[in-house]
Image (cartoon, rainbow, N blue to C red):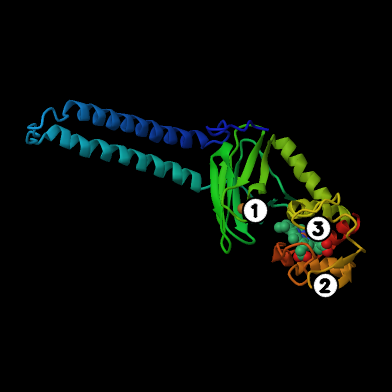
Amino acid sequence: MEQRQAFWLPDAASTYAGDVDALFYFILIVSVILFAGVMATMVLFAWRYRRRSAADRPKPVKENKIVETSWILVPTILVAIVFVWGFRVFIHMNVAPPNAMEITVRAQKWSWLFEYPNGVRASALHVPVGRPVKLTMSSADVLHSLYVPAFRTKMDVVPGRYTYAWFEATRQDTFLLMCTEYCGQQHSMMLSSVIVQSQDDFEAWLQEGLLAADASPAERGEMLYTQQGCLACHSLDGAPGTGPSFAGLAGSERVFADGTRRIADDNYLREAITQPATEIVEGYMALMPGTYALLEPDEIDALVAFIKEH
Ligand SMILES: [Cu+2]
């Protein structure tokens, strides 16, 4: 895993990261030079033209064409350079090459789901090195933002529309991927990783994913438990989190906030997933997202089977 750096961004690992950095450092250095120059001149003038006696009056200021022209021209040229340069990098970062591999990204409170053209789904983004990848992103609930610092890739994920990002990774490593749009209680846990692999390893991983599609319902449920972000709120070891643990849940008697009780049979588990707001388990808040009603029926079956094994 890449080093987490405290101040500067991690070492560049995508084809356009160098361009982003060059522009950023240009703006930073120009700003520092201008700031230091303006401050130094201000201090110097304050001392040099200080009032020396009670009778001291400022002399009339005469116009100076060279000074006036330069303070119009220099900033105009600097801003024009930053605009043209920034626009080129912006267009480059926003228009995916036509040969890019497409991956669908689904963001939801508080997890990421990546879906490949062959149907494989994963909670970490696996990509081959040296190949452009285009992300088509949508959100199941609120605003999120996908950010991979090492790639300098950042794009909002907006409910109700698709947004896009692309990158080409330049070296094999595991990089941090995170949400940078505050999206509620567990926002800071909305982390994943980009696993950059050789073309062969990547193909092998995709094949493995296809085989997993023939797994048993409980095994598929286990994958969904991670992919759909249930793990953020439900533990498997009995420890209570934002939601109750799945340990020993199936078949036990549930007590709800309104005092009613019910045995956690298959139907209860299904309803708890698809309509979490109807029965609130005593001692918990109604924090479970309602978006799981959109899961495919076989996915809900798989989750129920998985919960029953714990
Ligand atoms: Cu988020």
Indicate which disc, 3 or 1, sits on the residue closer to the N terminus.
Answer: 1
From the top left corner, tell me how far across and down residue 204 is, in percent. Answer: 77, 40
Given the image, on which type of amino acid does mark 1 rest?
Thr
Residue located beneath label 3 in the image: 244
Q: Secondary structure at mark 1?
A: strand
Q: Is residue 176 above or below residue 161?
A: above
Tell me if mark 1 has few (under 14), some (14-19) or many (20+) residues whose alpha carbon lies within 10 angstroms of its own: some
Residue at x 85%, y 61% (from the top left corner): 304
Can residue 97 be seen here?
A: no
Q: Secondary structure at mark 2?
A: loop
Instruction: State the count of labels.
Output: 3
Residue located beneath label 2 in the image: 259
Q: Secondary structure at mark 3?
A: loop
Tag 2–tag 1 contact (CB < 8 Å):
no
Indicate which disc, 2 or 1, sits on the residue closer to the N terminus.
Answer: 1
Given the image, on which type of amino acid does mark 2 rest?
Gly
From the top left corner, tell me how far across and down residue 179 is, in percent. Answer: 60, 48
Can residue 78 be seen here?
A: yes
